[in-house]
Amino acid sequence: MADRHHATLAIIGLPNAGKSTLLNALLGQKLAATSQIPQTTRTRVLGVIDRGDTQLAFLDTPGIHLPKHALNERMMAHVEQALEEADIVLWVVDADAYLGTGEHALAKRLRRMERPTYLLLNKVDLLSKGRLLEKIATYKDLLPFKEIVPIGAKTGLNFEPLWALLERDATQPGWPYAEEVFTDQTERSLAAEFIREKVLRKTREEVPHGVAVLIEQWLEPGEADYPEDMGPDGVFIAARIVVDRDGHRKILLGSGGAMIKDIRQSAQRELKKLLQRPVRLELFVKADEGWRDRPDRLDRLQL
Ligand SMILES: Nc1nc2c(ncn2[C@@H]2O[C@H](COP(=O)(O)OP(=O)(O)OP(=O)(O)O)[C@@H](O)[C@H]2O)c(=O)[nH]1
Ligand SMILES: [Mg+2]
C-alpha cells in the first residue's frame, strides 16, 4: 500500500484523432462513443485502471475546435477542466493528417502550461515507416515533449512501451480512486452515448452535430409498466433522439422508418452487450430547433 502511486492523464487533441478509441482500448472496455464524425465526444469521460502499484486515471475529452454553439463552448470547458486536473497530458494526433493551424495553436497553449506532455502519433497503421519518421521530425519541434510514441489505438499497437512509460511517470502518491472504481459514467449515460454513436455512424453532414439522446424511461423487472412479456432479468429503455431540424427528423426516420429501425436494432445489440442482460429499446425522434444554444436543454442533457 505504501508505495502506491497514481497519475491523472488528460487525453486531448483535435477532433477525430482517435482519443476515445484510445481510452476504450487502454481500458479494455468500451466507455466512450467513437465514430468517423469529428466532435463525437461531448463531455469528459473518466476511465481508471490499476496496474500493479500504479493507478492511472484517464480523462477522454472532446476534440478541440472553435465553438459555434453554446454546446461547443461547454465541450471546450470540459477540455480546460481536464487539462487543469491532469498531471500528464496525452496529446493524440492523427499521424496520417496534415499538421495545421489547430496543432500550432494547441502547442502554443501547452507550452504555456508546462505540463509533462506525451505526443501520441496515432493511426500509424495508415503510414509507411518513412512517412512516420517524417511526421516525428515535423512534430518534435512543436513542444519539448516528454515522450513521442507512435501508436495504433484501434489495434493496441505499441501499448506495452506506452504502459511502461506511464507507470514510470505516475509519481503522485496514493490512489485517489477505490479499487472497484472504473469510470464516472452511469449505465444510463453510457446507454445514451452508445445510442448516439449508432446515429453518428449512420448519418452524415449536418445531422450528427445536431443529435442528442435523452433516456426517458428505464424500467427494471417489478416496476410498473415493465413489459409483461419481457422475462425476469431484462431492462426496458425508451430514449428520445433530439435533432436540430424537422428535416433531420425525416432523415433519421428514413423511408418507411427503415433508418430508425436499423439504428434501434444496432443500438439494442450494443446495450445488451453493455448491460449483459436482455434489453428492449424504443426510440422516438423529436426536433428541437436551436437546442444546442439553449442552456436549459444542455443542462437536461447533462452536457
Ligand atoms: N486506421 C486507424 N483508425 C483509427 C485508429 N484509432 C482511431 N481510428 C479511427 O478514427 C476515427 C475517430 O476516432 P475517435 O476515437 O472517435 O476520435 P476522437 O479523437 O475521440 O474524436 P472526437 O471525439 O470527435 O474528438 C474513428 O473512425 C476510429 O475508428 C487507428 O489506430 N487506426
Ligand atoms: Mg472522442
Image (tube, rainbow, N blue to C red):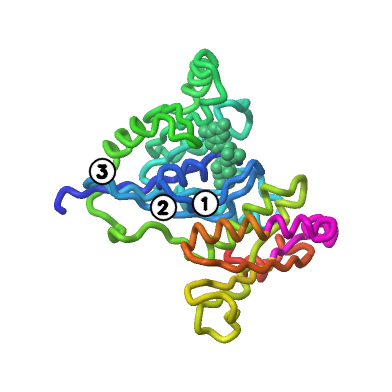
Of the four image quadrants, the one with ligand 1 is top right
For the point 23% across and 53% down, the residue is: 174
Q: Which residue is mark 3?
A: 171
- What is the secondary structure assignment of the residue under circle 3? loop
Kindly check if marks 1 and 2 are in contact, taking CB atoms under 8 A apart as contact: yes
Q: Which residue is mark 2?
A: 47
For the point 39% across and 39% down, the residue is: 115
**Where is residue 116 shown, x and y percent of the image?**
37, 37
Residue type, label 3: Thr
Is residue 242 inside the magenta stretch? yes
Is residue 300 inside the magenta stretch? no
**Which region shows up in magenta?**
241-263
Along the line of sight, which residue is nearer the eye, 221 or 92?
Answer: 221
**Where is residue 88 shown, x and y percent of the image?**
38, 41
- What is the secondary structure assignment of the residue under circle 2? strand
**Where is residue 229 shown, x and y percent of the image?**
59, 78
Cα–Cα gap, marks 2 and 3: 18 Å
The numbered mark at residue 185 is none
> Can you tell me whether the CB of the residue at mark 1 lies under 8 Å from the nearest atom of ligand 2?
yes
Which sits earlier in the primary sequence, circle 2 or circle 3? 2
Residue type, label 1: Ala
Visible in this render: residue 147?
yes
Q: Quadrant of the C terminus?
A: bottom right
**Quadrant in the rendering for residue 163:** top left
Q: Is 225 positioned to the left or the right of 286 in the image?
A: left
Along the line of sight, which residue is nearer the eye, 126 or 95?
Answer: 126
Q: Is residue 245 above or below residue 106?
A: below
Cα–Cα gap, marks 1 and 3: 27 Å
- What is the secondary structure assignment of the residue under circle 1? loop
